[in-house]
Image (cartoon, grey):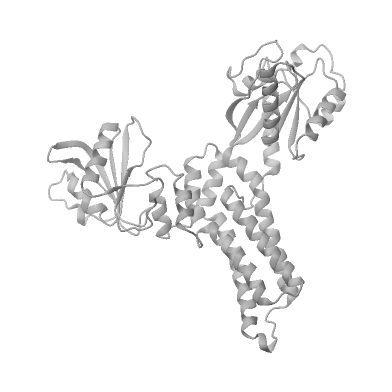
């Protein structure tokens, strides 16, 4: 159960669990300073913690009548100039799990409550330090695993996405004001805005929401990592290629066809982007029950991948055979816009140019020797080009499924207003869909929210944030 009241004081360990040089215990709420004063013993005896100004650090010890627990640094942040907007105290102690737990126990014994996951950030939202989409970006920033996911989270936390949503919402608010004004003068049959101008505005709103919706395909992979499926016939060197990319022996390599029977996954950061590589079972007809399951999983990985590396043996496979295989799996994949990179492997075994070399070159095939790790850098460059070509540079990018759902609902409502306007629907009926669109956009920034939504969002945060 989430507490939407700020009347009590909460505490939690804000650093990762386990041993470390230091740990930080965070306290927030109206009694943060006065309760911390009960367990903190400053080095300067005349010092009064209750009178300490904001953003100051003080050295002393923590303990009670039973004895001193640890020497600590205590930092004070006075409301409203703190992360949560409340009085906040942060106790930096040595990183012993025993010390951390004992300090928490001391605070709890003085009447402070243990914080729920994400409750510090929830309080920051409730105290208007930032809106809901910015609060969600805090969790994304903590879990960012590459430069691109970090940059995206930072942009959203600093309000780049919020600003765009507020602009859209304001346009709808202005539109609503005109329509509702017409309702007040309905008997005089007065129009306060020309219908062509209104339709133009609605088209702009539809285009802008559609652009944001489309950006999710980019934002989601940046946030979660770009899924790359390594596929091809058995024994063409898929596992060897994965090992070469990762620069470690992750997958078992064997000349026996069908060695890889389940998907093997690992992640590597290339040029600031996180790529999730999946080595799959070879595509072929098989009577082996276990291998057939592996091949079925291969097809599932192909469907989920954003980029497909189709690996073939340059010493055996002709251009026609490769094209036939590519066209077959494209037919079985709903999203035909997937980027397919052809990788001709085993160049170390060539004594002459492969058959169809000119045709392969025109398709920008990457020729590698996975065994010797030759030209792997060319493959990395091709992967980066694939991502950057789809990147909406300078545009607002949606990376959150909740935001996507709200935008899709808002767009549907805007389209209903457009349709109703063109069919001559009365203003009072138009306002129903307008308010629906405003509601869905407000869900993103938290202007419209419920306790259930807040609980769902902040429960996914780590405790102490």
Q: Position of residue 92 (x, y in %)?
A: 29, 40
Examine the rendered structure and indicate whether residue 385 appears above or below residue 442. above
Q: Nearer the viewer, residue 457 or 432?
A: 432
Q: Position of residue 20 (x, y in %)?
A: 34, 31
Residue depicted at x 37% and y 44%: 464
Residue placed farthest to the bottom in the image? 188
Q: Is residue 105 left or right of residue 344?
A: left
Examine the rendered structure and indicate whether residue 111 appears above or below residue 63. below
Residue depicted at x 67% and y 35%: 304
Residue 44: tell me if it is visible. yes
Q: How many marks?
A: 0
Q: Nearer the viewer, residue 103 or 50?
A: 103
Residue depicted at x 58% and y 29%: 268
Q: Nearer the viewer, residue 93 or 261?
A: 261
Residue 381: tell me if it is visible. no
Q: Is residue 250 left or right of residue 122?
A: right
Image quadrant in which you'd find residue 374: top right
Examine the rendered structure and indicate whether residue 408 appears above or below residue 348. below
Q: Is residue 82 left or right of residue 147?
A: left
Q: Position of residue 148 (x, y in %)?
A: 58, 41
Residue depicted at x 65% and y 81%: 182
Q: Position of residue 210 (x, y in %)?
A: 69, 55
Examine the rendered structure and indicate whether residue 33 appears above or below residue 267. below
Image quadrant in which you'd find residue 232: top right
């Amino acid at each position: 159960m989430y507490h939407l009241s700020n009347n009590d004081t909460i505490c939690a360990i804000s650093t990762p669990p386990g041993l470390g040089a230091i740990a930080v215990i965070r306290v927030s709420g109206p009694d943060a300073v006065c309760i911390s004063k009960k367990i903190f013993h400053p080095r300067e005896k005349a010092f009064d913690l209750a009178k300490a100004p904001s953003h100051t650090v003080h050295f002393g010890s923590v303990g009670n009548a039973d004895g001193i627990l640890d020497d600590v640094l205590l930092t004070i942040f006075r409301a409203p100039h703190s992360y949560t907007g409340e009085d906040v105290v942060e106790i930096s102690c040595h990183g012993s799990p025993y010390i951390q737990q004992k300090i928490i126990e001391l605070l709890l014994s003085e009447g402070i409550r243990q914080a729920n996951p994400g409750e510090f950030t929830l309080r920051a939202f409730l105290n208007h330090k930032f809106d809901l989409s910015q609060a969600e970006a805090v969790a994304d920033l903590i879990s960012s695993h590459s430069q691109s996911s970090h940059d995206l989270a930072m942009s959203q936390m600093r309000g780049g996405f919020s600003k765009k949503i507020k602009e859209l919402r304001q346009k709808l608010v202005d539109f609503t004001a005109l329509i509702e004004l017409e309702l007040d003068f309905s008997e005089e049959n007065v129009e306060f805005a020309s219908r062509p101008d209104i339709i133009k505005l609605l088209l702009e709103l539809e285009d802008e929401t559609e652009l944001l919706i489309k950006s999710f395909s980019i934002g989601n992979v940046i946030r979660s990592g770009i899924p790359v499926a390594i596929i091809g016939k058995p024994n063409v060197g898929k596992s060897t290629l994965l090992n070469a990319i990762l620069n470690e022996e992750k997958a078992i390599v064997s000349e026996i066809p069908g060695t890889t029977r389940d998907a093997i996954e690992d992640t590597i950061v290339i040029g600031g982007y996180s790529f999730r590589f999946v080595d799959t079972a070879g595509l072929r007809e098989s009577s082996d029950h276990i291998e057939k399951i592996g091949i079925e999983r291969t097809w599932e990985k192909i469907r989920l991948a954003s980029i497909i590396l189709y690996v073939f043996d340059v010493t055996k496979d002709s251009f026609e055979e490769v094209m036939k295989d590519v066209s077959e799996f494209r037919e079985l994949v709903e999203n035909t816009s997937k980027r397919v990179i052809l990788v001709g492997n085993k160049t170390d075994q060539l004594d002459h140019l492969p058959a169809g070399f000119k045709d392969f070159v025109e398709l920008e095939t990457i020729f590698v020797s996975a065994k010797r790790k030759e030209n792997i850098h060319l493959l990395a460059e091709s992967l980066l080009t694939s991502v950057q070509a789809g990147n909406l540079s300078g545009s607002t990018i949606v990376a959150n499924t909740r935001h996507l759902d709200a935008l899709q609902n808002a767009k549907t409502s805007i389209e209903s207003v457009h349709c109703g306007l063109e069919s001559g629907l009365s203003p009072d009926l138009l306002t129903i869909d307008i308010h629906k669109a405003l509601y869905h956009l407000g869900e993103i920034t938290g202007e419209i929210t419920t306790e259930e939504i807040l609980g769902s969002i902040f429960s996914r945060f780590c405790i102490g944030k």
